[in-house]
Amino acid sequence: MHILRPPVVLLLWLASATIAGAEPHNDRLGKVHIKKVAAVVTEYRHNSHADIIISRLLQTDTLDGKGNDSPLELVALYTDQRPTSDTSRMLAASHRFPIYDTIAGALTLGTGKLAVDGVLIIGEHGDYPRSESGNTQYPKRRFFEETVDVFRKSGRVVPIFSDKHIADNWADAKFIYDTTRELKIPMMAGSSLPTAWRKPAADVERGAPLKEIVALTFGSTDHYGFHALEFVQALAEQRRGGETGIAAVQCFTDDAVWDAADRGVYDAELFQAAWDRLPRRTNGEVPLREAVAKPILFHIEYADGLVANVLELNGAVAEWSAAWRYADDDRIESAQFITQEARPGMHFTYLLWGVEDMMLSGQPSWPVERTLMTSGALDALLTSRQKGGVRLPTPQLTFAYDSDWRWQAPPPMPPGRPWPEQ
C-alpha cells in the first residue's frame, strides 16, 4: 500500500497582483477542495522543469517550505528516464507519494480506473533524439496517448497541462489538440514568459491594430526560441480582430540575417526600442555584426498583414525584450520580459497559478490555441532553416482564435538563491 501525505487546509496566495485577469487566490478561492494530480515527466532532477514546477506542490511556491502551499496535491509520478542526478525518489520518500513504472499506473494509482483530478505533463530535459530540423523529440504524443487511453477506459476526462510546446512537430501537436476537442478535455500548455514580469509594465492595447513586432532572444534556438514565440504570440493575440493565423514563415541565418536587416525585412526603429530595453547587452565597443557569430532571424507573416521578427543574438543578448508598432498612428511601445534567473525561479509560480485555476475550475486560463500556433510556427521555422532559409507558406497555421486572457503584473520577485542549492 502506498501512503500518501494527508490533505491540508491551505492558506492561498496573499499577493495583491494577479495574472490572467483573475482575483488573488485567497480572495477568489478561499478554502478549496484539494485537487489530486499525477505528473508524467521525462526526468526529475534538481532545477529541471519537473523540479521547478512539480516541486512547488511539495515545497511551497518558494521551493523551500516557507512560501504558500498549492491547492494541488501530487499523488503519483511517472518518470520516463532516471538520470544519476534524479531527485524524484528522494522526494517521494520524504513527501510520501508513489512513483509508478507506467503512466496508466500513475493516473489510476494502481486501481485500473482514473483516480486523479488532473495531469501534469512535463516533457523537458532528458536524453532524447533530435529531428532532422533540430527540434528535440520529447515523447509528448506518447505521454498524451497513454493518458487519453486511461480516460477512454475510465469513461471520464480531467484537465491536462503540458509544459512548453504541445509537441515538437505539427502532426503530433495537431493530433493532440484535435483529440482534446473530440473528448472535451480541458487543456493548457505553454511557456512561463507570457505571465512573467515586464519592464515597463506594458502590453498591446486590447483591440488595437498592430503593424509589426520585433523581439530579441538568446540561447538554444528550439528551446529558448519557443519562449520568444510564446511571448510574441501573447502580444499578437491582443490586436484588433484577435488571432487570424500565420500565413508564412522564413528563417534567416548567418549573413542572411544582416542582409535582411539591410533590406528592411524588420523595422530598425523597433529593433532599437527592443535593444534599449535590455540592461545586459554588448556595450557597443564591438559592432553587433562582429559580436554575434551565428545570428538567427525568425520572420513571421500573419494572415491579416501583421509581421513579427524574432532575432536570436547570442554573444550580444542574454535576456528577452520586444517592441511593437501600432498600425493606426505608428506609435511604438516596448518592454523587457523578465525571468528570475535564480532559485526559486518565481516566474514558474505565475505559470502554475494559471494551471491551478484550470485544475480547480475545469476552464483553461489562456487558450491552448496560442501554444498550438507557436508549436506549429517553431516546427515550420526550423524546417525553413533546414531547407536553407526558404519562405514556407503555412496553411496549417491559418486558423483563428480569440483570447480573453490579459497580462497583469505579478508580485515582486522574492530574493533569489543560487541555482545549485539543494
Image (cartoon, rainbow, N blue to C red):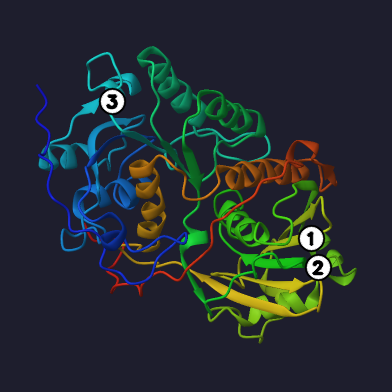
Q: Earlier in the sequence, mark 1 or mark 3?
A: 3
Q: Earlier in the sequence, mark 2 or mark 3?
A: 3
| Amino acid of disc 3 | Ala
Image spot of residue 79 (x, y percent): 32, 31
Image spot of residue 148 (x, y percent): 44, 22
Mark 1 in CB contact with mark 2 (< 8 angstroms): yes
Q: Is residue 255 left or right of residue 171?
A: right
> Which numbered marker is on residue 266?
2
Report which residue position mark 3 lands on: 106
| Amino acid of disc 2 | Tyr
Mark 2 in CB contact with mark 3 (< 8 angstroms): no
Q: Quadrant of the N terminus?
A: top left
Report the Cα–Cα distance between label 1 and label 3: 44 Å
Q: Nearer the viewer, mark 1 or mark 2?
A: 1
Q: Nearer the viewer, residue 204 or 135?
A: 204
Report which residue position mark 1 lands on: 307
Report the Cα–Cα distance between label 2 and label 3: 48 Å
Q: Quadrant of the C terminus?
A: bottom left
Residue at the image position 64 percent from the left and 56 percent from the top: 233
Residue 413 visible in image: yes
